[in-house]
Amino acid sequence: MRFGSLLALVLMLGLPAWSAELAVMRNGFTIRFQRSEVFESVTRLYLADAPGNFVDIPSGDIVRFETEEPLPEVKPAAAQQAERQSVTLGSAIEAAGRKNHIDPDFIVSLIRAESDFNAKAVSRKGAQGLMQLMPKTASEMGVSDPLDAVENVEGGTRYLASLLARYRNDPRLALAAYNAGANRVEQYHGVPPYQETREYVAKVLADFSRTKTAKSVGASSSVSSSLSRHSRNVEARLSTEVESRRVSTYQAQVYP
């Protein structure tokens, strides 16, 4: 292989994700390789860890060898922050759900209705954070900073768990109390006749139902796909066996 062609190939390969060696040539170019072997006056550079992917270079054309370390992947600051927040929030919801015996998807549906995942949300009445905790409720639940996403989720989930326990795990009454206050639920012996509260309860329950249905359908599709692949494999195997027997029978007839 001529050096010009080799150079074009190396440039097209781009930067790999692993560390490698560099052969520094007399003309100033470098060749990235994984390992090398010397055969008399020729040095063989393996461009990848495969027997056939190499190039032979006159040893005299190589000035020296250097070790190249991979460049770390650099993400924009905003993307890094969003990724950290996403991982932290997801983990916080999962942990809070396990600790308080509440389905994490139910917590997610409530957060979507309360703040649409805006950790810095503050309502006109003073409710704060992801789960829109009122200052008094936040204090009772041990939340020192309601605008901290993790603290808010932990405190809000504890409060939701207390309401579910109070109303014998009736999600309608627990959500109504979360929105309008437990005293209103007691006053009306059920969901208060406030349009906002009734719409809120319906919204959270509908969102939760959609989430569980989507996951159920996804799981069913996965099982169906697996069964379909298995069926195709069995069919292909049977077809091969039939064809093999047909050929054997033909050979026995032709060559008795």
Image (tube, rainbow, N blue to C red):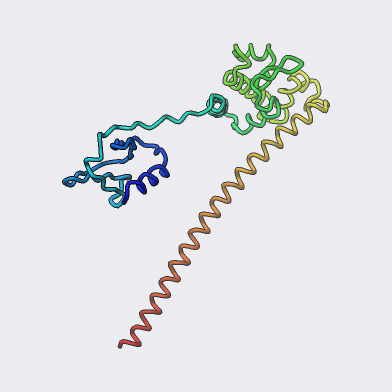
Residue furthest to the left in view is: 40
Name the residue: 38% across, 32% down: 70
Q: Position of residue 242 (x, y in %)?
A: 42, 74
Q: Position of residue 119 (x, y in %)?
A: 64, 21
Residue 133, image quadrant: top right
141, 248: nearer the viewer: 248
Quarter containing the C terminus: bottom left
Residue furthest to the front in view is: 27
104, 164: nearer the viewer: 104
Q: Position of residue 80 (x, y in %)?
A: 53, 26
From the viewer's perspective, is residue 212 above or below residue 242? above
Residue 150, image quadrant: top right
From the viewer's perspective, is residue 11 above or below residue 120? below
Name the residue: 35% across, 47% down: 6
Q: Position of residue 60 (x, y in %)?
A: 22, 40
From the viewer's perspective, is residue 112 above or below residue 7? above
Q: Is residue 23 left or right of residue 105?
A: left
